Image: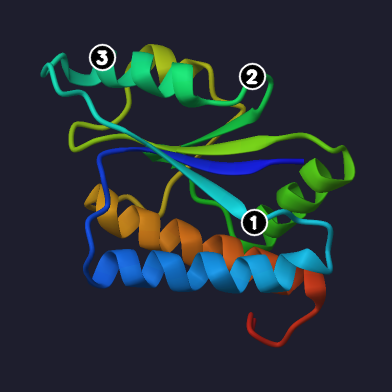
Amino acid sequence: MRIDIAAVGRLRKGPEAALVDDYLDRFARTGRGLGLPPIGVIEVEDRRGGGMAAEAELLLRAIPQGAALVMLDERGEQASSPDLAARLGRWRDGARDVCFVIGGADGLDAALRSAADWQISFGRMVWPHLLVRVMLAEQLYRAATILAGSPYHRV
């Protein structure tokens, strides 16, 4: 199994990068005993200004072949943390790769969204894609703690 986050844009040093790194490190430590690999981060950048379609092409080339695609989109399902943990557990048990996809400032191209196995939202509000990375990293760590039976997630 392989788990990746594919995102448009480069995360520069700063508080967001520190938080993402911290949660991904926590995930790696917690996930090791659960059969979950460390999460890879794939960053793409459209330097030609081609918009969402160009970003979608870059993302499609970066996404591992055959991976379950989870698109983060404001129109997606507002899943619970236990829902994410359950899906992560099923992908692990089925040895299926998974790739979480975060678009750029304008979102994700409709053609790319239509290829999603699951579209999820962190609420009806629009979030800056840098904060979405932080929230996704935290939710993946939370999912691992749920699978581990850790008290981190409280209901």
Compare residues 93 and 21 and report the one nearer the observer: 21
Q: Can residue 126 be seen in this view?
A: no
Task: For label 3, count other residues whose C-alpha is less than 10 Å away and answer few (under 14), some (14-19) or many (20+).
Answer: some
Residue 72 located left or right of residue 93: left
The type of residue carrying mark 3 is: Ala
Residue at (41% x, 54% y) in the render? 122
Q: Distance between the residues labelled 2 and 1?
A: 18 Å
* Above or below for 38 versus 46: below
Disc 3 is placed on an element classified as helix
Q: Residue at x 73, y 47 (%)?
A: 87
Q: Residue 65 carries which label?
A: 2
Q: Give the residue type that dot 2 points to.
A: Gln
Position above or below: 152 against 32:
below
Task: Give the residue drawn at x 21%, y 68%.
Answer: 14
Question: How far from the left and from the top, in percent, is residue 145?
Answer: 70, 74
Q: Do the residues labelled 2 and 1 touch (CB within 8 Å)?
A: no
Say which of marks 3 and 1 sits in front: 1
Q: Nearer the viewer, residue 92 or 110?
A: 92
Which is more N-terminal, label 3 or label 2? 3
What is the number of the mark on residue 38?
1
How would you rate the neighbour count of disc 1 (Cα within 10 Å): few for under 14, some for 14-19, many for 20 or more? some
